[in-house]
Every structure is written in C-alpha cells, then in structure tokens.
Image (spheres, rainbow, N blue to C red):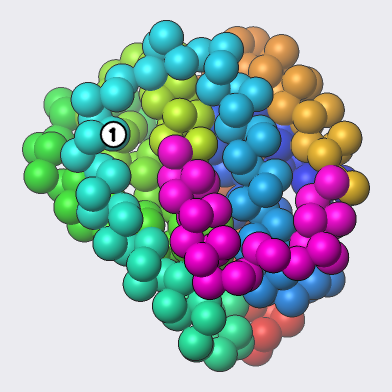
Amino acid sequence: MLVIFVAYFIFGISGFGSSIISVPLLVQMYPLKSVVPMMVIVDICASLYVGRKSSKDANFKELKWLFPFSLIGMILGIYLLVKAPSEPLLITLGCFAAINGVRVLWQRNTEMREPISKWWAAPFGFFGGTFTALFATGGPIYVSYLGLRINDPKALRATMAFAIFSLTFLRLTLMLVTGLILSWPVIGLAICLMPATFLGIWLGTHVHTKLSNAAMRVAYGSILVFAGTMLLIRQL
C-alpha cells in the first residue's frame, strides 16, 4: 500500500513515474507477470482521473508522432514478457531505474533548451513502447522526449497524463489478447490497491503547484535510484 501511495503521489505531481517507482519494489513481493498487468489496471484508472482534469492543456500534436512507433515497441515488449525469462528482464529494469534516477538528479537544475527534432519520436517511441509493455515503465522515456519538445510544465504534465492513458489502453488491449490480464488474483490485487492509488493522486495533485521543479526532480530521482538499486541487489 505504501509503495503504491508514494508512486501515485509522484504521479499526481508530475503526470508520470508511478510504474517505474512501484514496479521495481512490487516485483520483490509478486511475480513480474502479475505486477505488470495489475499496473495496467491501476494506471488506466489513475490516468483517467488526472487526464479528465487537465486534458485541455495537453499537446496532442506531439503524441501523434510518438504513438505509431510506441505500438511497434509494445508488440515486441509483450512478446518478450510472455517468452523471455524474468531474471534478465528484472536486471534490465533495475539498471534502467537506477540510471534514469542518476540522470534526473544530475539534470535537476538544467534549464530548458531549444526543442529537439520531432524525428527523435521514432527511437523514443519505440523504446518507450517496449519498456511500457515489459515493465509498465515507459513514462521516463516519453517524458525525456516530450520534456525536450514542450517548454510549459503544465502542458507537459497534461500531455504525459493523456499519453499514459492512451498507451495503457493499448497495453490493456494487447494483454487481453495474450490472456495476461484475465486473472482474478491480478484484478483483485488491483482493486485492493485503488484506495492508496487515489489518495496518493489526490495529495500529489494538491501539492504539485507548491513544489519547485528542482525539488520534484530530487525526490523523483532519489526514489528511482533506491528502487533500481534494491532490485539489482535482490537479483545479483
């Protein structure tokens, strides 16, 4: 419950980050193939809650470039989730979380540069889709791209919330096809975690305007480094 509360507190503040914070910790208690589809259910409810309040601020033009490449990456990610052994995937997730956390901490005071080319949507979308399907953790990849394209933090948060909802819906469809999500234990676990999810989102939404961008990045980066390091210690 505490893991989910903290993860969706961060989601309420930034519009992303719930899965990459929670999944590395949850897989130490539950199997990866249960955690990922469970996070699909929770994410789609959370992104609906945030997205319906901020959709008017979202930049939909940027998402049109990301989604086709994301779909290709998600197909590969679903295949790897079903066929590949979990240990190397979890090691990859731990490395990804820790490295991303270090990057966030390193760049906490970095000022916004000129927007990068929209053609970067191809690699960011593909790898974001792959990690989204594998670990439900593509958000940091997408925000790395969108953060270099969108200067307004309010628009970035709204765009990320809508992106998470759309990508989660695609992931839900693919997992229904493969049968990963048709499990009563998975659905039951998701339902049990809903109170902590919405409490975290509610609190995060109320405090996000009071925090500086640097303070948000320090908190987010520190949690990522902790989660990734703990996962690597457990696997190695």
Q: In the picture shown, does residue 199 fall above or below 233?
A: above
State the residue at coordinates (15%, 26%).
114
Inspect the image, locate mark 1, and give the three-letter code of the amino acid beneath it.
Answer: Leu
Magenta part of the chain: 166-191
Closer-to-camera residue (89/41): 41
The quarter of the picture where residue 215 lies is top right
Query: Is 190 included in the stretch rendered in magenta?
Result: yes
From the top left corner, tell me how far across and down residue 214 is, in percent: 51, 27
Query: Is 12 included in the stretch rendered in magenta?
Result: no
State the residue at coordinates (29%, 24%).
60
Closer-to-camera residue (128/174): 174
Apparent side of residue 49 relative to residue 117 in the rendered image (left or right): right
Quadrant assignment for the C terminus = bottom right
From the top left corner, tell me how far across and down residue 129 is, in percent: 37, 57
| Residue 80 visible (yes or no) | yes
Q: Main secondary structure of the magenta part?
A: helix
| Residue 231 visible (yes or no) | no
Label 1 neighbour load within 10 Å: few <14, some 14-19, many 20+: some
State the residue at coordinates (84%, 46%).
191
The quarter of the picture where residue 76 lies is bottom left
Apparent side of residue 172 relative to residue 210 in the rendered image (left or right): left
Apparent side of residue 142 relative to residue 30 in the rendered image (left or right): left
Residue position marked by numbered label 1 in the rendering? 63
From the top left corner, tell me how far across and down residue 220 is, in percent: 60, 41
State the residue at coordinates (65%, 24%).
49
Closer-to-camera residue (194/14): 194
From the top left corner, tell me how far across and down residue 226 is, in percent: 68, 59
Q: In the picture shown, does residue 139 fall above or below 149?
A: below
Q: In the picture shown, does residue 62 fall above or below 100?
A: above
